[in-house]
Amino acid sequence: MQRTPPELRSNARALRTHSTDAERALWQYLRRLRPRFTRQLVVSHYILDFACRTLKLAIELDGGQHASRVEADVARTAYLEAQGWTVLRFWNHDVLGNMDGVVETILATVSRASTHPQPLPFREGSNKPLEM
């Protein structure tokens, strides 16, 4: 496993300290959610706004500056998805103006990701001890 470059770690720390209004609002919700989310997680050479390591779920918030960064965001999402991450993107104004809708989308994604794709079959008489 590669070590995180010190400059990325310090950038992530600074981003946690100087978060946007939308990031602070969403964090107030995500911090209580299970499985656990973290802020400003470094993955390779990217810093994710929010991430659930267990589910490999990344949540990215885009502000006005992101309109000019579409190609970079597409490349970032493609890289993360190739690494097995699911990426959800929301505009800051959606988080601030439609928190219920944003939370509903996140919860639906968490629910889908948390479900085992093929549940294990129940054994007949599962309360009985195994016979040897």
Image (cartoon, rainbow, N blue to C red):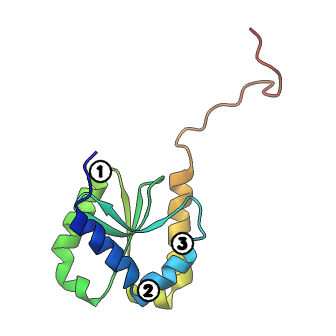
Is 130 above or below relative to 115?
Answer: above
Q: Position of residue 44 (x, y in %)?
A: 25, 57
Between 78 and 21, which is closer to the camera in this rendering? 21
| Residue topped by disc 3 | 30
Instruction: Using a 10 Å C-alpha cutoff, classify the residue at mark 1 as few (fewer than 14 neighbours), some (14 to 19) or many (20 or more).
Output: few
| Residue topped by disc 2 | 22
Between 123 and 17, which is closer to the camera in this rendering? 17
How far apart are the two marked residues, 2 and 3, measured between alpha carbons? 12 Å
Label number found at residue 98: none
Amino acid under label 2?
A: Ala
Q: Position of residue 122 (x, y in %)?
A: 70, 31
Q: Secondary structure at mark 2?
A: helix
Amino acid under label 3?
A: Leu
Q: Position of residue 2 (x, y in %)?
A: 25, 49
| Residue topped by disc 1 | 83
Quadrant in which the N terminus is drawn: top left
Q: Is residue 54 left or right of residue 13?
A: right
Disc with the residue nearer the chain's start (1 vs 2): 2
Q: Secondary structure at mark 3?
A: helix
